[in-house]
């Protein structure tokens, strides 16, 4: 079982391939190389994911380009954003080890075929330094 504690970078994301008509794993550098990449998607792909010892699972996203320090300070003061390590804290959930497996709280809830589905999902190990969680493959930084 991989020790998740530490910083992880997003290296791949599930994307829709229009030519093939299906979802597939796409490398972050290929997503960012597209001429028409959405600005928010580009920021998200540059996020850092932290698995902390206390069980917090934190997503930190770079600040948008062209935003002044004054605008950032106002947004923080208004409670619109939280900063951490010079990045925006965009998501905070939890992770745990259960029955010898790394599990992450995805924050998603709902029903599938009439059965309630909880937010906990196994963090899949791809190789010794890569894991899969939600729509992302992460590599230890």
Image: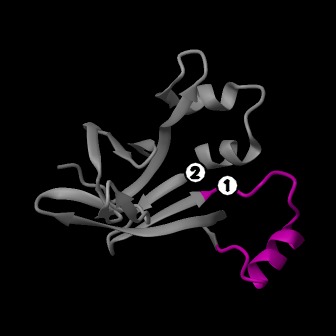
Give the spatial CA distance, label 2 vs label 1. 7 Å
In the image, taking residue 80 as reference, residue 96 lies left or right, namely left
The image position of residue 117, as x and y in percent, is 32, 62
| Front residue of 88 and 92 | 92
For the record, the magenta segment spans: 61-82
Name the residue: 53% across, 53% down: 48
Provide residue 74's location: percent of width, then percent of height. 84, 78
At which x and y percent is residue 111? 36, 61
CB atoms at circles 2 and 1 under 8 Å apart? yes
Does the image show residue 46?
no
Residue furthest left as drawn? 99
8 or 124, nearer to the observer:
124
Q: Which dot marks residue 62?
A: 1
Residue 76 visible in the displayed image:
yes
Residue 75 part of the magenta-drawn span: yes
Q: Position of residue 62 (x, y in %)?
A: 67, 55
**Near-viewer residue (9 or 20):** 20
Above or below for 4 versus 19: below
Label 1 element class: loop
Judged from this view, the residue extending furthest toward the front is 114
Q: Residue at x 78, y 83 (%)?
A: 78
Marked residue nearer the N-terminal end (2 or 1)? 2
Name the residue that disc number 2 marks.
Answer: 47
Q: Nearer the viewer, residue 135 or 89?
A: 135
The residue located at (77%, 26%) in the rendering is 35
């Amino acid at each position: 079982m991989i020790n998740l504690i530490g910083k992880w970078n997003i290296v791949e994301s599930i994307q829709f391939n229009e030519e093939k008509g299906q979802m597939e794993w796409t490398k972050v550098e290929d997503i960012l190389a597209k001429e028409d990449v959405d600005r928010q998607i580009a920021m998200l792909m540059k996020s850092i994911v932290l698995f902390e010892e206390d069980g917090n699972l934190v997503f930190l996203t770079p600040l948008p380009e062209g935003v002044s320090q004054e605008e950032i300070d106002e947004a923080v003061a208004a409670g619109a954003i939280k900063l951490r390590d010079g990045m925006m804290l965009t998501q905070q959930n939890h992770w745990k080890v259960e029955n010898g497996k790394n599990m992450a709280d995805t924050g998603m809830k709902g029903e599938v075929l009439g059965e309630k589905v909880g937010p906990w999902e196994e963090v899949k190990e791809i190789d010794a330094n890569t894991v899969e969680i939600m729509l992302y493959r992460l590599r230890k930084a």
